[in-house]
């Protein structure tokens, strides 16, 4: 995706438009990987809705962990996702979120 290395804040609307389509599992994962790359390289609070979709609909625990990392780095990890993460099958996600929650207390 062009936006990975040439992203401007005004490009968010294009990323959102592409990602808000319906995809089969394979395409969702493929496009989700690209979107994760975009937001790992370009921090923005606007990424929350897309990251929520990747977390809840994504079947890949590695992608979910990358998603959580982005949310934590942007300090936009919502209470809703935090609570879900405490029961995630990925141990590293559970521990990162526990640490994040405890640091905010």
Image (spheres, rainbow, N blue to C red):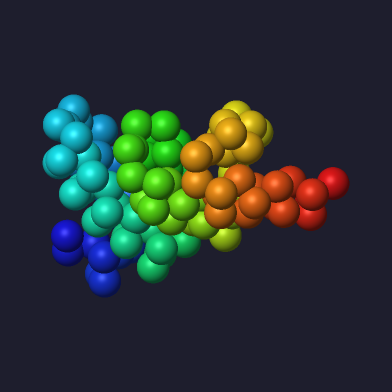
Kindly indicate the quadrant of the structure image that contains residue 58. top left
Question: Residue 64 appears at what percent x and percent y?
Answer: 42, 46
- Which residue occupies 33% across, 45% down? 60
Image quadrant containing the N terminus: bottom left
Reply above or below: 24 against 3.
above
- Which residue occupies 53% across, 38% down? 88
Reply above or below: 35 against 2.
above
Question: Residue 25 appears at what percent x and percent y?
Answer: 19, 35
Reply above or below: 95 against 21.
below
Q: 28 or 43: nearer the eye?
A: 28
Kindly give the residue lying farthest to the right in the view shown.
Answer: 105
34 horizontally vs 48: left or right: left
Whether residue 54 can be seen here: yes
Q: 14 or 94: nearer the eye?
A: 94
Reply above or below: 22 against 60.
above
- Which residue occupies 41% across, 32% down? 56
84 horizontally vs 24: left or right: right
Question: Residue 95 appears at what percent x and percent y?
Answer: 64, 51
């Amino acid at each position: 995706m062009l936006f990975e290395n040439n992203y401007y804040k005004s490009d968010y609307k294009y990323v959102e438009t592409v990602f808000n389509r319906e995809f089969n599992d394979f395409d969702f994962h493929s496009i989700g990987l690209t979107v994760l790359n975009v937001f790992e390289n370009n921090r923005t609070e606007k990424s929350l809705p897309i990251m929520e979709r990747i977390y809840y609909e994504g079947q890949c625990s590695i992608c979910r962990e990358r998603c959580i990392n982005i949310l934590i780095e942007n300090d936009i990890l919502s209470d809703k996702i935090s609570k879900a993460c405490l029961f995630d099958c990925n141990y590293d996600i559970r521990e990162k979120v526990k640490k994040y929650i405890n640091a905010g207390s």
